[in-house]
Structure formats: structure tokens, C-alpha cells
Amino acid sequence: MSKKAIVIGAGIAGLAAAVRLANKGFQVQVFEANAYPGGKLSEIEIKGYRFDAGPSLFTLPDQVEELFRISGKNPSDHFQYIKLPVACHYFWEDGNQVKAWADINQFADEVETKLGEPADNVRKALKSSAFIYDHLSPLFMHRSLHKLNTWTNKEALKSYLKMGKLGIFSTMNKANEKRFVQPKMVQLFNRYATYNGSNPYQTPATLNIIPHLEFNIGAFFPKNGMHDITLSIYRLALELGVDFTFNAKVDEVLVDNHKASGVLVNGQKYLADIIVNNMDMVNAYKSILRKQKQPKLLLNQPKSSSALIFYWGIKKNFAELDLHNILFSDNYREEFEHIFHKKTIYHDPTVYINITSVYKPDDAPKGCMNWFTMINVPNNQGQEWDKMIIEARKNIIAKINRILKTDIESLIEVEDVLEPRTIESRTSSANGALYGNSSNNMYAAFLRHANYSSTIKNLYFCGGSVHPGGGIPLCLLSAKIMTEMVEENLEAK
């Protein structure tokens, strides 16, 4: 008789965990509090406009493809994507614009022409990013940091000799200031701290690993939109026999003699050999694990930033805009000071505009665009959000009007809003933080919850709030690391 696994939450990591466990012979049952799979990686449809609701950047597509390969299927038969020729289009208030071309030499030449930054500095920066990736990804992305063999294998020993070059003892900003001569290039590369909700003036320079994913490997776009990542993995799970129950909020993880034995849902007990928690770790301990010993040090770590997103249906086509667009703040340091220390929104925020209709025209009516318009904001600490959102909306519109020389307010025909309070209520993300704990100190990676419980047998964790971190690739890797641990523990019995 096959072993049974219960997965709590159908976020992207929960879906991947279900697929991987099914491939290991488990009978898998997934309980999801919402009426749909995907968690943050969902979609919104409003009067002819479709928006990817959450994550908008797609890197490391092989992590999605691997789920199909291990299931004996050809990935391209189920999920298709393209590599972007331009990773992002950057705008500044003084009129400067830079396209981050996928071709590194073309990007380097553009930066030299437009900003006066020596092209070779860009090439050296991306070479350094690749170096960090080669030495740290085997440790921090593909293995558990909480197992001794991670630190005693040959790859780890090689990396120890390179620690001084990996940026562990510096901040992202300091490293970038040494690397580039133009402040705009420092700002452009500092932006990568926001990919896991952190502050470039505090986070370790090891986070300069991120540009490698976007440039050296590539930025991609699913042909059917980001939500297709969710749908394709969900359909795969169904084909593998995974059982999904939606609108089913888990009330408690059942624990007997320090061993997880099942879950309680609407007063009914469901038993299993292993329990996998894909719910935000902090809220899980506050709710479904409230009777268990609390890992207070991990629970009390500073949380990542959150987001304020306006989903706008724009009744005009802006030819100068790409899939990913950034309108930079004139004072980046002050913007992050407001987010992480003052816990409020800076009056001149950096504005990110994602427009999937550039590559998927049916996401908007003809001649129109679907704008996912986002700024980074603090996580929810009980601020006066209603007042702050009204003010931020005015400042965002004013900034767009200045840089694009338009009247965007008159072009908005549909609107929806997502902000820290609704992010928390819809996705159970503690304080509405997008990535769990922030990475604003050199020990942050070690202060993420492991992919297993050290005090409760047969209880495992995956998702953006645990190791290795937030974002689509890391969530998928968390499911992989977790499943490998399950397999190791079964073999040890």
C-alpha cells in the first residue's frame, strides 16, 4: 500500500511538492483555503483585461520543466515560453532610458552610450555574478543549509576558499559602488535586492547573484502568461492522481508523541504518513501549529517588504513600453529608508510596470494595455494604509505623467488594488511580506526555517517563507529539497 502525504496549501511550492511526492509513489492530498491553486501566482480578469496577479518575472524555467521530465512527459507539450530579447526597460526623471538587452554585449554598449558607464564594467559585473552563482547556488539554492553534509562535501570546501570574493562581508550597494562609476548603474544593479524584498544598503553583496539569472541565463515569459506556470503544474498534478480540496482551511496539524499524523479540516481528521506545510511559516505556527513549540528566533526575524499594486486597464498603446519597465526614484537610498526604517511610502517611489499584453495581446482589448503597476512598500505594521494608498496613487500617477509625458489618469478604464493587508488575507503571508524574512543581514539565509521540523517527525516545509527563499525558482527548489529529505528519511528507516 502506498504511503500518504498531505500538503497544506496549493501555492507554487505546494503544487511542485505534490508532483514530486506523487512521483515517489505517495498518495497525495492537497488542502487549499482558497478556491483556486497558485497562491500569489494567480490571475485577475476585469472587463476584458487579464492580469497576472503576483510574481511577474520568470527565470530558471528548467525548474518548471523538470517537474514534467520526472513525470515522464515532454515539457513543451504542456508548458511553453519564450526568452525575452529585453529583460527590462529603465527610465529616469532626467530623460535617460536604458534597455537591458538579453545580449550582454549589446546591453553593455547601450549603457556606455546612454549613461557613460564603461561597457567592460558591465561585463565584469555579470562575470562576477556568474562566479557567485557557481560557488553559492550549490550550497544556498539546491541543498539544505541545515544538514551537515551540505557543508562537508567537495563543492562546499571549494567555496570556502573563495569567501572573500563572494560578497559575504560587504553590502550590495558597497560592492556596486566599487564596480560602477555612474550612480545610475549602481541604482540599476541595486534594484536586484527587491527581488527578495530586501534593502540593497543592508543586504549582503552575495545577492549580486541575481543578475546572473536574468542576464547570463535569461529572463523568460510563458506564452500563456505567468499564471500558466500554476495551471500547467496543477494539471500535471491532477494527471498524476493528486487529490485537491479547495475552500478547505486546515485548522490544525495533528501531532502525537512528537510525530505529525494528520490534519484537522472542518472538524474532520485526515491522517497521513507525512505532512507538508506550504503555508507561510510564521502564520502556520500561529495557527495550525499553535499547540507546538514555537521557534521564536525564526518567527521574530525582520520581514521582507510588501507591495502596493494597481491593476490598470489602459485604453492606449504605449509603444515605448516593454513587458518589464522601471521608472526610478531620484533618491533610492531615501526610498529604502522609508520602506524599512520609517515603515511608510516615499513620496517619489520607484514604479514598476509589467505589461503582459506586449507579448500576449489578448490580455487587453485591441489598442489597450494591461498595466500591473507596482511599488515596493513596507510590510503591514498597522499603518494608516487607506490614507497612504490614496497618497501613493497620486504620486505614482504624477511620476508616470512626468516621465512618459502623458495624462495616465484619463486613460484608466478599469482598476483593482492589491496591498499588504489583502496580500496577507488572501495568501496567509505574515504581515503581507512577499518573501517571508528579509535578507538584510549576512546571517539571514541561516535564519530561515529548514525544510523539515527539528522537533516534529514527519513534518516538512516548503515555500517562499522557508529555505531557500521567495520567488518562483526558489519556491520550486524548496519543494525539491523537501522531497529529497523525505526520501532520505524513508531510506533511513
Image (tube, rainbow, N blue to C red):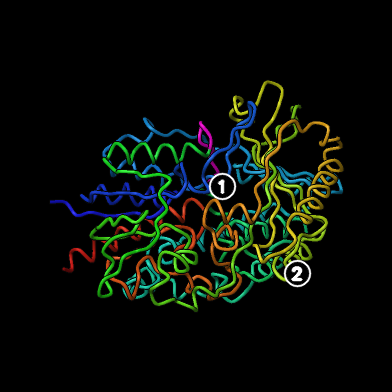
462 and 112: which is toward the camera: 462
The structure residue drawn at horizontal position 38% and vertical position 47%, both measured from the top left corner, is: 15
Locate residue 46: give its quadrant: top right
Question: x%, y% of residue 241?
Answer: 26, 40
Point out residue 285 in the picture as x, y percentages from the top left corner: 45, 68
Question: Which residue, given by chain and number where applicable, does mark 1 sit on?
Answer: 55
Q: Which amino acid does the dot numbered 2 rest on? A: Lys
Residue 156 is situated, as x and y percent measured from the top left of the image, at: 39, 71
Q: Residue at x 40, y 68 (%)?
A: 289
Residue type beneath disc 1: Pro
| Residue pictured at 53% horizontal, 76% vertical | 443
Q: Is any atom of residue 437 visible in this view?
A: yes
Instruction: Identify the residue shown where x is 54% and y is 51%.
Output: 426
Task: Depth check: give the residue in front, 283 or 194.
Answer: 283
Report which residue position mark 2 lands on. 342
Q: Which residues are magenta?
A: 218-225
Q: Earlier in the sequence, mark 1 or mark 2?
A: 1
Q: For residue 369, which quarter of the picture? A: top right
Residue closest to the far left:
1
